[in-house]
Every structure is written in C-alpha cells, then in structure tokens.
C-alpha cells in the first residue's frame, strides 16, 4: 500500500477530463454522507424526533377532551420540518458545491501512485493517498473519502471523464492498491 517500490501501479497514471455535472456531485455528496457516522446518527435523531412529534400530535387529537390546535400544529410542523431538513440537506450541499465547481468549467484529474491532482480554470489541488484512504464505486463515479476521524471530505472521479472505458479497471486497481473500498 502507498506506493512501495514493488507496486505494479507505481508508474500507472490515469487521466480524466470532464465537465462538472449536478448528477455526479449529488451522487458524490450522497455517498459521502452515507459513509459518515455523524450523518447516520443525525438522520436517525431527526427521524426519531419527527416520529415523536407526530405521535404527540396524534395523541393530542385522540385522547379524551378538547384537542389543543396549537399543540397539534406545532408538533405536526416540527415533525415535517425535521424530515424536510434531513431530506433536503444533501441536495442543498450538492447544489452549493456544484455551483462552485461548474463556475470553473472543464476539470482535469490525474490519479497515480502518489494520489490525485485536480485542476480547473482557476484552481489546482493535490491530495495524497493518506488523505483519501477510503473509496466507494458507483455506476457513475469513484468517490474518494477522507479518513473517518477527519470528517466527511471527498473527491470524485466520474467514469465519463475517462478516455477509454478500460481505464475504469486500471483506476479501480490503482484505488484498490492505495485505498480501501467501502
């Protein structure tokens, strides 16, 4: 792992060129959030709060006596808001990220034994394998993830950016050598 001298991919270099697509960014954000423990916990907490709020509203309506319309409305609103925030969070993050990358135009990425390099009109970024030790492959992308302990950073490599479909196998082998597949 991490580019030893017997590494058969040491001189392997995979290049990608692509225009940022909202669908790619949305999928990369979804994968990143799904891989984050904090997101799973927050999502569970939000859904639990929604269920509790709806239960309180239902009890208010079903228990004997006159229901308090204010309590019912507050609890129904709170439950709805909790679900909406969880459902829209990924979309909002993906949209904000996409607007930033789309403004840079065509992106170029080079992945080799040292890590990845991304470049666009006004920016260049180099990320070594130590910062991207995990990855997820989807039908559209390779999503490279930061270590669990550092949060939920990511980089993505869209398969449509590869020059040759066979490069997907080479990229997968390179990622398997330097990163752990989730």
Image (cartoon, grey):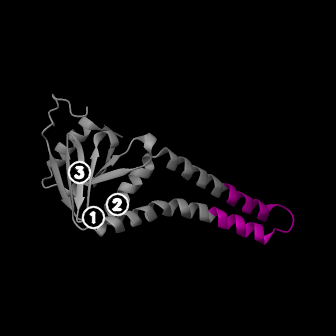
Residue 21 lies in magenta, yes or no?
no
Q: Residues within 10 Å of mark 2 (few under 14, many from 20)?
A: many
Is disc 2 placed on a helix, strand or loop? Answer: helix
Residue at the (39%, 41%) spot, across then down: 147
Determine which of the numbered discs, if any, sits on residue 25 in the image.
Answer: 2
Q: Residues within 10 Å of mark 3 (few under 14, many from 20)?
A: some
Q: Quadrant of the C terminus?
A: top left
**Which residue is disc 3 drawn over?**
117
Q: Quadrant of the N terminus?
A: top left
Residue at the (70%, 64%) spot, across then down: 75
Whether residue 170 is visible to the viewer of this picture, yes or no, is yes
Is disc 3 placed on a helix, strand or loop? Answer: strand
**Which residue is disc 1 drawn over?**
20
Q: Earlier in the sequence, mark 2 or mark 1?
A: 1
Magenta residues, start to end: 52-79
161 and 61: which one is in front? Answer: 161
Within the image, what quadrant is residue 158 found in?
bottom left
Q: Nearer the viewer, mark 2 or mark 3?
A: 3
Residue 138, relative to residue 5: is it above or below? below
Q: Earlier in the sequence, mark 3 or mark 1?
A: 1
Is disc 1 placed on a helix, strand or loop? Answer: loop
Within the image, what quadrant is residue 95 found in?
bottom left
Distance between the alpha carbons at the discs numbered 2 and 3? 18 Å
Q: Which residue appears farthest toward the right when viewing the image? A: 65
């Amino acid at each position: 792992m991490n580019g030893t001298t017997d590494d058969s991919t040491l001189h392997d270099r995979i290049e990608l060129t692509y225009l940022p697509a909202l669908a790619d960014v949305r999928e990369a954000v979804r994968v990143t959030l799904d891989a984050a423990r904090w997101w799973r916990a927050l999502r569970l907490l939000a859904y639990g709060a929604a269920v509790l709020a709806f239960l309180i509203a239902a009890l208010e309506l079903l228990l004997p006596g006159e229901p308090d319309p204010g309590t019912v409305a507050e609890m129904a609103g709170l439950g709805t808001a909790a679900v909406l925030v969880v459902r829209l969070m990924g979309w909002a993050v993906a949209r904000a990220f996409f607007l930033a990358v789309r403004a840079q135009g065509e992106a170029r990425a080079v992945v080799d034994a040292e890590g990845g390099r991304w470049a666009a009109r006004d920016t260049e970024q180099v990320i070594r394998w130590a910062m991207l030790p995990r990855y997820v492959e989807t039908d559209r992308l390779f999503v490279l993830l930061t270590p669990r302990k550092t949060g939920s950073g990511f980089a993505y490599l869209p398969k449509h950016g590869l020059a040759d479909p066979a490069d997907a196998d080479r990229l997968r082998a390179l990622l398997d050598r330097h990163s752990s597949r989730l």
